[in-house]
Image: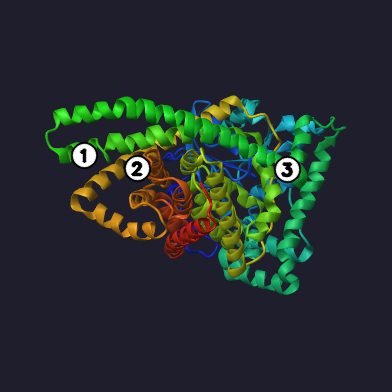
């Protein structure tokens, strides 16, 4: 099937092949076979993934902000006794003028994979802006069902929609839903299972010259209306014959660069007329507390204190409760007090060979190091982070944060939309690198990827660093100041040095909601499941590689090489092991520093310097591999080399500066 093949190799805007990856926080894949296909499409953050979850019983990350589904999720659904394959596509605004890579992927599925039913999910209160895509789907000759989701929000804003009349005007089934509550989704299932092909009732009429060319291609050359539009706008990619290329040339000579705008404007004109015909706006209810709070979060004067409050709450829950209270209990009481001594005695009694004992226990054993790091040090931090982050993203705060930081982000070559991958990087930099697909230009995607690899610690690494420096507020402040300064300075320099257009910013602002407990719990559980499936084995593998490296001498050789720059910046030689661990997993390296600090081998200025260097050090092997796939080997290797050099340079300068100033930590 074409879809399964395309999931592994997509084409970017330049036609270059690239590998498609699945997000560690969301995408689920299932072979759909030959069953009828349902494609869920629509703008970001309108509820496609919620409907996917209801139809299939599979979990996809559902968040109250745009850009969650950056790759394709598939699952099977049984509807009316029949089996269907369901495809959850990335958010898109238009088939005619996609902006991001994720929109290109969605368009490719719709136009080339011929799903049996296309379910267009829209935000009911923004009908006028949503219907242009509906019109394009109809003109593409697809079996379209329109879902007016978020009807509760529309009603609260005083928007009333005549669903029956809208269905009559468009000539397609229309279902009004509140997907998060499961309201009226049974009606959607009925529409899907009983879908019958209908002749479209609505037609977008363009200017006379454009309309003549469209009719000629549609009636005489086998193009659908939408295929003809695409061929006229982008003949190099969509024209199938000389007739389309010649028509595009004629219109280009007549209209120049305004051709695409003239065509798109007609879709919006028709959409506006339809929305006006079927929509009645009553008096809006009094502004709610949530709406007042929404305004405050986006106002720089009030938004910054709110942001600081949110960050402080994160610190208390993740940095204090997770990284200190839980870690101290599980790592100190459970592992160091009971599990490790017991396992050491057990393996020493049943295995007579010390070299085999070392594989499982002692200093670098699978149980005493790998599993201890994964379960006792990293798991409590990751768990509390995922829980706190799920609450935050489900509330709808992140798009408002994007609006707040847009002006600052433009200084570093990005825009407010980039807050999504940047913030997600604090959960998992690997997943966040994939999410950079949602950014509009290659320049923005490269800058965001670079900053993620350099100055954004993942949740586990961040938590361990917070635990490492928690008892020393001055050290914590220095680490934070250096990291923020590096982020802004390097971002600013990258924006100055890299050519490209100034980034533009657009984003759907969802309602500010009270997080739904079931969604938060399911989402946190799904991410914890990902942790155990994807990350936990890496700790075990790393322990085995370290054991093998120690036997062969490779481990000691590499540690010896790393120890030179480590000692040059005033750190103990033993910390070289932590930096080597950091390439396997960033949090693995941070946990190594945590062990050194607990043993008293790392304190004062070297402690904060080591935290800074590890934060800026090379990305973990998983993030590096995703950078290689998403941005190409040249950028991945350049980032790797720059990070090593820059991290130790900053460490040396910081150590010298703090020592010269006589700073006491």
Question: In the picture, residue 509 is in which quadrant?
Answer: top right
Labels 1, 3: front one: 1
The single residue placed furthest to the left in the displayed view is 352
Residue 598, image x, y percentages: 39, 38
Residue 638's tag is none
Residue ID at (46%, 28%)? 326
Q: Residue furthest right?
A: 283
Contact between labelled residues 2 and 1, with CB atoms less than 8 Å apart:
no
The tally of labels here is 3
Task: Provide the residue designation for mark 2.
Answer: 538
Q: Helix, strand or loop at disc 1?
A: helix
Depth order, front residue of 314/8: 314
Closest to the observer: 131 or 450? 450
Q: Which residue shows up at 66% across the image and 60% down it? A: 411
Residue 566 % position (x, y): 38, 57
The answer to whether residue 140 is seen in the rendering is no
Residue hosting label 3: 303
Q: Is residue 153 visible?
A: yes
Q: Residue furthest front?
A: 662
User: According to the image, label 1 marks what residue?
Assistant: 358
Residue under the image location 76 percent in, 62 percent down: 262
SS at mark 3 in the image: helix
Mark sitting earlier along the chain (1/3) = 3
User: In whole angstroms, how far apart are the C-alphas of marks 1 and 2?
Assistant: 18 Å
Is residue 619 positioned above or below 319 on the image? below
* Mark toward the start of the polypeptide (1 vs 2): 1
């Amino acid at each position: 099937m074409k879809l399964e093949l395309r999931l592994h190799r997509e084409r970017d805007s330049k036609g270059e092949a690239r590998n498609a990856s699945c997000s560690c926080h969301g995408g689920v894949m299932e072979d759909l076979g030959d069953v009828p296909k349902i494609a869920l499409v629509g703008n970001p953050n309108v509820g496609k993934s919620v409907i996917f979850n209801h139809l299939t019983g599979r979990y996809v990350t559902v968040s109250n902000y745009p850009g969650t589904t950056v790759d394709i999720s598939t699952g099977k659904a049984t509807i009316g006794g029949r089996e269907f394959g369901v495809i959850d596509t990335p958010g898109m605004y238009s088939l005619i003028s996609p902006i991001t890579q994720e929109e290109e992927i969605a368009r490719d599925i719709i136009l080339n994979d011929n799903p049996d039913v296309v379910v267009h999910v829209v935000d009911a209160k923004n009908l006028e802006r949503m219907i242009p895509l509906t019109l394009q789907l109809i003109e593409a000759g697809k079996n379209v069902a329109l879902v007016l989701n978020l009807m509760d929000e529309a009603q609260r804003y005083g928007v009333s929609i005549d669903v029956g009349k809208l269905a009559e005007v468009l000539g397609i089934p229309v279902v009004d839903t509140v997907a998060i509550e499961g309201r009226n989704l049974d009606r959607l299932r009925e529409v899907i299972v009983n879908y019958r092909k209908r002749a479209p009732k609505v037609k977008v009429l363009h200017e006379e010259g454009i309309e003549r060319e469209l009719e000629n291609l549609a009636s005489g050359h086998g193009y659908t209306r939408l295929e003809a539009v695409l061929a006229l706008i982008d003949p190099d990619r969509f024209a199938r014959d000389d007739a389309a290329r010649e028509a595009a040339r004629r219109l280009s000579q007549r209209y120049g660069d305004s051709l695409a705008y003239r065509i798109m404007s007609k879709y919006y004109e028709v959409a506006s007329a339809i929305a006006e015909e079927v929509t009645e706006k009553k008096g809006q209810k009094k502004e709610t507390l949530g709406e007042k709070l929404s305004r405050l979060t986006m106002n720089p004067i009030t938004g910054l204190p709110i942001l600081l409050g949110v960050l402080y709450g994160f610190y208390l829950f993740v940095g204090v409760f997770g990284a200190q209270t839980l870690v101290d209990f599980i790592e100190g009481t459970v592992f160091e007090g009971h599990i490790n001594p017991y396992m050491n005695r057990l393996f020493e009694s049943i295995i007579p060979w010390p070299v085999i004992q070392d594989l499982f226990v002692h200093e670098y054993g699978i149980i005493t190091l790998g599993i201890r790091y994964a379960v006792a040090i990293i798991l409590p931090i990751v768990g509390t982070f995922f829980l706190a982050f799920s609450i935050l993203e489900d509330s709808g705060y992140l798009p408002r944060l994007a609006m707040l930081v847009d002006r600052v982000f433009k200084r570093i070559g990005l825009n407010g939309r980039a807050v999504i991958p940047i913030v997600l990087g604090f959960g998992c930099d690997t997943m966040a690198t994939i999410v950079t697909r949602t950014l509009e230009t290659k320049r923005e995607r490269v800058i965001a990827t670079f900053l993620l690899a350099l100055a954004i610690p993942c949740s586990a690494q961040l938590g361990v660093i917070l635990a490492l420096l928690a008892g020393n507020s001055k050290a914590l402040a220095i680490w934070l100041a250096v990291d923020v300064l590096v982020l802004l300075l390097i971002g600013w320099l990258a924006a100055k040095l890299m050519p490209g257009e100034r980034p533009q910013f657009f984003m759907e602002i969802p309602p500010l909601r009270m997080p739904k407990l079931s969604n938060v719990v399911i989402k946190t559980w799904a991410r914890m499941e990902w942790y155990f499936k994807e990350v936990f084995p890496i700790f075990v593998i790393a322990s085995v590689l370290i054991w093998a490296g120690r036997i062969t001498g490779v481990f000691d050789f590499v540690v010896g090489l790393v120890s030179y720059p480590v000692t040059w910046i005033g750190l103990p030689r033993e910390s070289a092991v932590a930096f080597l661990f950091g390439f396997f997993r960033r949090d693995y390296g941070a946990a190594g520093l945590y062990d050194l600090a607990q043993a008293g081998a790392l304190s004062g200025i070297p402690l904060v310097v080591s935290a800074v260097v590890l934060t800026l050090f090379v990305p973990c092997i998983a993030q590096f591999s995703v950078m290689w796939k998403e941005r190409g080997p040249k950028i991945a290797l350049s980032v790797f080399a720059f990070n090593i050099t820059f991290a130790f340079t900053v460490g040396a300068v910081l150590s010298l500066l703090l020592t010269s100033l006589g700073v006491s930590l």
